[in-house]
Amino acid sequence: AQKITQTQPGMFVQEKEAVTLDCTYDTSDPSYGLFWYKQPSSGEMIFLIYQGSYDQQNATEGRYSLNFQKARKSANLVISASQLGDSAMYFCAMREGGYSSASKIIFGSGTRLSIRP
Amino acid sequence: EAGVVQSPRYKIIEKKQPVAFWCNPISGHNTLYWYRQNLGQGPELLIRYENEEAVDDSQLPKDRFSAERLKGVDSTLKIQPAELGDSAVYLCASSLYGAGEGRETQYFGPGTRLLVL
């Protein structure tokens, strides 16, 4: 079974609009962490934002925010005021197993975001 | 502060040849990861080190892949012999174990793009 599901293989958004990238996850572990990474065409994975399973508030980092809905096992990334430089692949990832040597990090299949000028 | 360094950036070899990738993590990071990323997919963990100990190598194809991190700093991933299906991007990442619950954010290098002919 898929642990991380990103249902949008590709998205087109007009510059300056907000965009939501979907991510759902599957775990029975009460302690886990959720990450979003950006991968431009250059190939490097860039860390954007983190949400812990026990965090009470949604994470925010500049124009990025994470819409964390624990009961629905959803961790959508919201980018406000999109810019041309936001065009890239976006990956949702989950660490489960608690903070121990047994922790595994699993990535979704990604969403390709294209910003139209 | 220098990021994760990987070399080479690109490698083209013929099948059955050996190949090696090198990674130097962010200074002070005790956890190091090797991932493989196939075209159009998210990264998949091959091996994870905590200091010099391989704590998760369950996804490493041990018949042809090997890795080492002898002094707990830089690491080498080797494939011998390479097969056509090994063509992918090999990503190295590092993080700081003990940074706090869930704060094991991974920082990635630029990757090595391998093409096996």
Image (cartoon, rainbow, N blue to C red):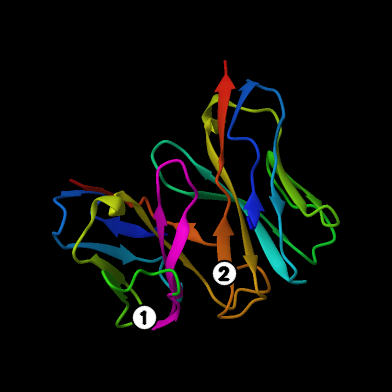
Amino acid residing under circle 1: Gly
Q: CA distance from mark 2 to mark 1?
A: 20 Å
Image point 64% across, 53% down: which residue?
A4
Subunit of label 1: B
Q: Left of A82 or right of it: where is A110? A: left
Residue picked out by circle 1? B72
Describe the element under mark 1 as helix, strand or loop: loop
Residue B75 coordinates in the image, percent (x, y): 31, 71
Q: Nearer the viewer, residue B8 or B40?
A: B40
Crowd around label 1: few <14 · some 14–19 · many ≥20 (10 Å): some
Q: Main secondary structure of the magenta part?
A: strand
Image point 85% across, 61% down: which residue?
A56
In this rendering, is residue B51 above or below B96?
below
**Total marks in image:** 2
Crowd around label 2: few <14 · some 14–19 · many ≥20 (10 Å): some
Q: Left of B80 or right of it: where is B58? A: right
Q: Left of A37 or right of it: where is A26? A: right
Image point 47% across, 58% down: which residue?
B44
Magenta region: B31-57
Does the magenta run of residues contain A114? no
